[in-house]
Image (tube, grey):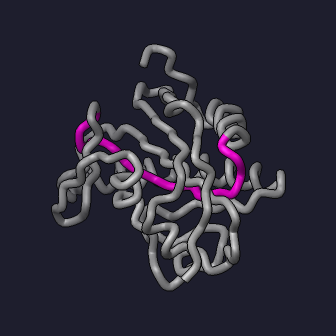
Amino acid sequence: MSYIRSFTSAPSGPINLVGKTGQAVQISIHNPSPYICANCEQILPDWKQQQFLWVVVILQQSRHPLMEITKETEREKERLREKFMRFGCDVAFNLRDRGYLTDIIDPRTGYPLLSHPGLVPHDDTAVAKALLNYPVIKNDCCVLVHPEWGTAVYPSILISEAPPEIMEVVIKAIAPLHGWTENTYV
């Protein structure tokens, strides 16, 4: 078993964005959780001997609480998943073009989108809980509880070896292309 080393500092706080329809988006960059450190090669088998690793947590505010499984909440989760996949792919390919190994985790399956899937799926909710210290409600599925949005939150994860400063520049440049602008009123 190999462990990932990480830097000890990250940008000062989350990147707060808002979409065209008013839903908030919070993006934060973190050292990897102990679970990711211990299981990186089983989650991302293509990633061998990575010296440094960062986890980007992307939280999108949902139009509805995601506690119950209904047609409405399933449509909303699919809409938010698609939004993340488009945004995440743009960020990942930009970072890859700069020479940094980067991948996004499909929130539905828990497997990487741009690398071979490993033996162990990733759990976005568990990692968001570990890194942000937000509570989780265990129902039919685990639901993250945001301090302001309650259970109307959809977590997703991007993993990269790019330094946080580079990721922050790329994220802020790509966010407006997806209808997300910086929220200066937070």
* Image quarter of residue 174: top right
Judge left or right: residue 128 versus residue 182. left
Q: Residue at x 69, y 77 (%)?
A: 48
Image location (x, y in percent) of residue 125? 35, 57
In the picture, the quarter occupied by the C terminus is: top left
Tell whether position 162 is magenta: yes
Q: Residue at x 58, y 41 (%)?
A: 10
In the picture, the quarter occupied by the N terminus is: bottom right
Total label count? 0
| Residue furthest out toward the top | 185
Image location (x, y in percent) of residue 56? 54, 49
Image location (x, y in percent) of residue 131? 41, 51
Query: Which of these two is toward me, 2 or 104?
Result: 2
| Residue furthest out toward the right | 98
Query: Which of these two is toward me, 141 or 11?
Result: 11
Q: What are the residue bounds of the magenta stretch?
A: 149-164
Q: Residue at x 70, y 65 (%)?
A: 51
Image location (x, y in percent) of residue 122? 45, 69
170 over 68 or under it: above or below: above
Tell whether position 127 is magenta: no
Judge left or right: residue 99 versus residue 179. right
Judge left or right: residue 99 versus residue 28. right
128 over 150 or under it: above or below: below
* Image quarter of residue 170: top right
